[in-house]
Image: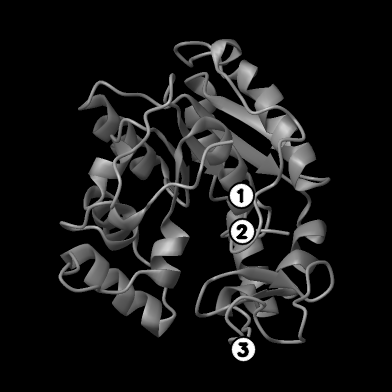
């Protein structure tokens, strides 16, 4: 397994740079993850990133954790995005696209990427295609994680997050050692606004229709693979690896790509986790 990558440039944008250069894997891969909130994309991104040597790039993590850090001045898109986030409003599509453009170096990095949270629309997908094409790059796969909403909602309702280090817990399946407190920094755990029941109902109802143009776009390009998201993280991880061979447009084919062996270990401790 590869060590976690520095993501300073992604989280801060603008002129920020990662503290260490990327370790370029033998075959860099560029992957998009699709699926509703709570289905476990963050967990799988961490596993895939460790197996492939690729960097996990999450737009949700930018919204949750990115803050101006001197001497790095935030770009215009980040400033606008943070204003939306502070008000609890949805970030408009054009602003999200600007946020990605401020971080285009991360998407063309020689180490590859696992992208979560973008694209969210056909317009954004086409913009991502063009951004990569400008550097003679393409996606290697788009993974659609699938699970009935009735199984996702309990994950979200029980999820708690440390506001300081962003470690994720669950009141039933992954509780902290001391009730309500983070194991690592002892901060009081909170429930994300978008994990509350009214927001969950809105998100699930909206998501049921919103990804269909994306799904058709990537299926027509020979990039889409669908993975059932039930079972343990390692079971879903191995299921994902097995599904990659169906991404017929990948070049070189996925059958030639090295992967970590099953049982190599699940990253733990502070992992940014989108589902449990």
Marks 2,1: beta carbons within 8 A = yes
Q: How many marks?
A: 3
Tell which circle, 3 or 2, labels the residue nearer the N-terminal end: 3
Dot 2 crowding, Cα within 10 Å, few <14, some 14–19, many 20+: many
Q: Quadrant of the N terminus?
A: top right
Marks 3 and 2: which is nearer the front?
A: 3
Q: Estimate how packed mark 1 is, as few (under 14), some (14 to 19) or many (20 or more) residues with alpha carbons within 10 Å.
A: many
Q: Which x, y percent locates residue 124?
A: 35, 44
Secondary structure state at the residue bearing disc 3: loop
Mark found first going from the N terminus, 2 or 1: 1
For disc 3, the marked residue is 188
Judge by depth and name the residue closer to the eye, 52 or 80: 52
Residue at 74 percent of width and 46 percent of height: 233
**Residue found at x 55% / y 39%:** 50
| Residue at the (39%, 63%) spot, across then down | 62
In the rendering, which numbered label is found on residue 240? none
Residue underneath mark 2: 274
In this rendering, the label closer to the viewer, 1 or 3: 3
Nearer the observer, 50 or 248: 50
Pinpoint residue 215: horizontal percent, then vertical percent.
55, 35
Above or below for 71 versus 19: below
The foreground one among 243 and 268 is 268
Position of 93 relative to 2 (above/below): below
Task: Return the residue at label 1.
Answer: 41
Pointer 3 local density, CA inside 10 Å: few below 14, some 14–19, many at least 20: some
* Residue 90 visible from this viewpoint: no
């Amino acid at each position: 397994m590869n060590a976690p990558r520095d993501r300073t440039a992604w989280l801060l944008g603008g002129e920020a740079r990662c503290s260490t250069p990327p370790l370029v894997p033998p075959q860099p891969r560029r992957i998009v993850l699709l699926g509703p909130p709570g289905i476990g994309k963050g967990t799988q991104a961490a596993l895939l990133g460790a197996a492939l040597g690729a960097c996990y790039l999450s737009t949700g993590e930018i919204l949750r954790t990115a803050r101006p850090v001197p001497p790095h001045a935030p770009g215009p898109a980040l400033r606008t995005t943070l204003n939306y986030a502070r008000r609890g409003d949805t970030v408009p599509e054009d602003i999200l696209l600007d946020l990605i453009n401020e971080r285009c170096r991360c998407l063309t990095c020689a180490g590859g990427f696992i992208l979560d949270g973008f694209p969210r629309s056909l317009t954004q997908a086409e913009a991502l295609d063009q951004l990569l094409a400008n550097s003679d790059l393409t996606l290697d796969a788009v993974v659609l994680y699938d699970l009935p909403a009735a199984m996702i909602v309990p994950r979200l309702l029980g999820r708690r997050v440390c506001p300081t280090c962003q470690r994720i817990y669950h009141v039933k399946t992954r509780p902290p050692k001391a009730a309500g407190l983070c194991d690592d920094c002892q901060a009081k755990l909170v429930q994300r606004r978008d994990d509350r029941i009214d927001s969950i109902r809105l998100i699930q109802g909206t998501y049921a229709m919103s990804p269909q143009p994306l799904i058709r776009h990537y299926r027509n390009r020979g990039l889409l693979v669908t993975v059932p998201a039930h079972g343990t993280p390692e079971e879903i991880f191995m299921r994902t690896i097995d599904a990659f061979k169906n991404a017929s447009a990948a070049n070189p084919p996925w059958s030639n790509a090295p992967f970590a062996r099953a049982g190599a270990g699940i990253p733990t401790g502070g992992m940014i986790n989108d589902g449990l």
